[in-house]
Amino acid sequence: MHRTARAFQRALGTAIIVCAATLAGCSGNGLFPDGGGGPHTLPAGQLNRLVNDASSAYHLSPALVHAVIDIESGGDPSAISDAGAMGLMQLMPGTASTYGVADAFDPYQNIQGGCSFLHDLLGRYGGNLKLALAAYNAGPGAVAQYGGVPPYPETQAYVRNVTALYREATALARTRR
């Protein structure tokens, strides 16, 4: 398929997802708001269980996964970025598909897919958290192109913010022991 046609298909697919989510009440109460806490909240206990299960399955720290979720979506399972990333861990449609996520707004699927992706990135970069986070945000191609964290202010801030939250949570957990 011609490159332009593929780009158009991706853009159209993202537009359809964003429109459907807006109509359903995602990311801003939409045209048909649900009236309750709805898709914009997830009880802390449920989120913790999902994160703990996925973290364990993919050998990740729950504190790291929580940090990614906090920075990516603020904990909103219905979040949609301007670029079309979806859900708690802000999966792009292609990434969601690659990791078997049929519904990126389903918290279970989203966290499983996001953790699998993060696990793979950590493996790819030999456990280097900064490179894995940069690739999670900007894509592995950008990390390869720049031979490290890309010079994008958004990506640099993302790596800094996720790392800071992760360190803070880890330090807090140590003081509680």
Image (spheres, rainbow, N blue to C red):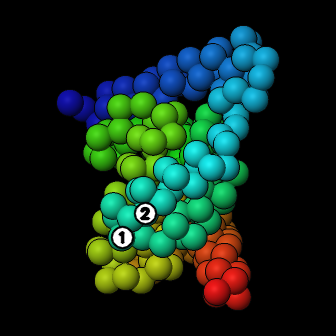
Estimate the x, y position of residue 68 in percent, counting from the top left.
57, 62
Q: Name the residue under label 2.
A: 55
Placement of the C terminus among the 4 image quadrants: bottom right
Q: In this view, does 79 lie to the left or right of 112?
A: right
Q: The disc labelled 1 sits on which kind of residue?
A: His
Q: Which residue is drawn at 29% across and 74% down?
A: 124
Q: From where the camera sits, is residue 140 visible? A: no
Q: Nearer the viewer, residue 161 or 66?
A: 66
Q: How many labels does the image show?
A: 2
Q: Nearer the viewer, residue 91 or 107?
A: 107
Q: Residue at x 75, y 16 (%)?
A: 33
Q: Residue at x 45, y 23 (%)?
A: 12
Outermost residue to the front:
177
Tell me if residue 110 comes above or below residue 130 in the rendering: above
Q: Is residue 86 left or right of residue 29?
A: left
Q: Mark 1 points at which residue?
A: 59
Q: Which of 101 and 172 is in front in this view?
A: 172
Tell me if residue 87 comes above or below residue 122 in the rendering: above
Estimate the x, y position of residue 152 in percent, counting from the top left.
60, 68
Q: Are dots 1 and 2 in contact, CB under 8 Å?
A: yes
